[in-house]
Image (cartoon, rainbow, N blue to C red):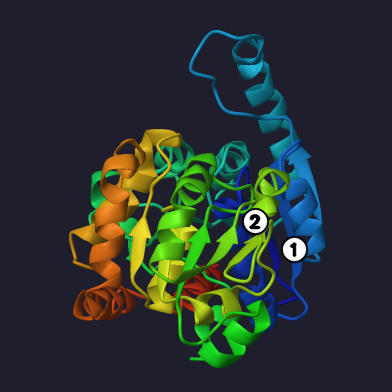
Amino acid sequence: MGSYRFILSGGGTGGHIYPAIAIANELKVRYPDAEFLFVGAKDRMEMEKVPQAGYKIEGLWISGLQRKLTLKNLMFPFKVISSLIKAAKIVRNFKPHAVVGTGGFASGPLLKVASGKGIPCVLQEQNSYAGITNKLLAGKVAKICVAYDGMEKFFPKDKIVRTGNPVRGDLVSLTDNRAEALGFFGLQPSKTTLLVLGGSLGARRINMLVERNLPFFKEQGIQIVWQSGKLYYEEYKKYESADVKVMAFLNRMDFAYGAADIIVSRAGAGSVSELCIVGKPVIFVPSPNVAEDHQTKNAQSLVEKDAAIMVKETELDEKFGTVFLKLVNNEALGKKLGTNIKSLARPNATREIVDEIEKLLVQQ
């Protein structure tokens, strides 16, 4: 047959976009002549990130329902109808052999249309608590690739395949390059290094925590690589010093992870999957402002396996100092957490997801 055509849809946040790009890249390795089209939501970050990765994207006029009565909510039915019409046109014109949805509002109309036309569809659910779009689509798709155990409470059991979440290629081959990594940031090998991750935009509460504890960290002889996020960089760059490296972005995540002895991070699905591969002790501070509080559930699933520590935002002021000191002063605890989190890593997730897509292509 001629070359394959694939549509990938997912977006709204990096957590949905990144896996879709990783899956496309792996498909491209296997099928160099294949054609790819991404479908996203018109005004969201995928419209910028996907073309940067070298793929074409079309935008649908779609967004989520707000929790209160707003003009946006009144527009919602029209957005759904408009998106279904446009999705039908995209599917009709592009004629995909398979469609992949990684979550986010745009994947809803697209996969509904494609599955209705008998095109094999695969869902990828990153979180331990399924998103609303994926839950609605579960009955219509051929396969659902998940990262956590116990997902049959959301999806039909016979469709679930446990693959893990795609992670960046440079992390899969992460080497123990501590000296080089510390050199990159201009840090000292003799000191303990704390890596603080709040996501690309940043996390206000985590930034406030670091700011408040700077004297405490100094007292403990801790040096910090602090990713403040682009929304907060201007506010916190004044703290830059020999022991405190403040950055909007971390362009070399391999060095950031290589330098770290302890990591403080949000608990988005992508971050959790990366941190399993990194295998260092982590204190998760889940964002409480996400759908279904899924970050807390992601972190909790690791805490239950003795693979991480979690401190909720509401408990940071009273608990963080004690928890941090316990970790710094107890090498055995740090080792145990690092070993346990690494045992949960799924470095071949992207390949396994694409294996599932290939099985469906063969059946056509």
Left or right: 252 as drawn, with respect to 353: right
Query: SS class of the residue under badge 2?
Result: strand
Q: Is residue 174 left or right of residue 26?
A: left
Question: Which residue appears at 63% of the width and 53% of the height?
Answer: 200
Other-residue count near label 2 (Cα within 10 Å), few / some / many at <14 / 14–19 / ≥20: many
The image quadrant that residue 341 belongs to is bottom left
Name the one closer to the observer, 93 or 202: 202
The amino acid marked with disc number 2 is Leu
Residue 175 percent across, percent down from the top left: 51, 91
Cβ atoms at labels 1 and 2 below 8 Å apart: yes
The residue positioned 55% from the left and 83% from the top of the image is 188
Residue 239 in sight in this render: yes
Image quadrant in which the N terminus is located: bottom right
Residue tagged by mark 2?
Answer: 8
Location of the C terminus (image quadrant): bottom right
Disc 1 is placed on an element classified as strand
**Dot placed on the residue nearer the N-terminal end, 1 or 2:** 2
Q: Which residue is mark 1?
A: 36
The location of residue 165, given as percent across then percent down, is 45, 65
Using the numbered discs, state the Cα–Cα distance from disc 1 to disc 2 in whole angstroms. 8 Å
- Residue in the foreground of this view, choosing between 143 and 216: 216
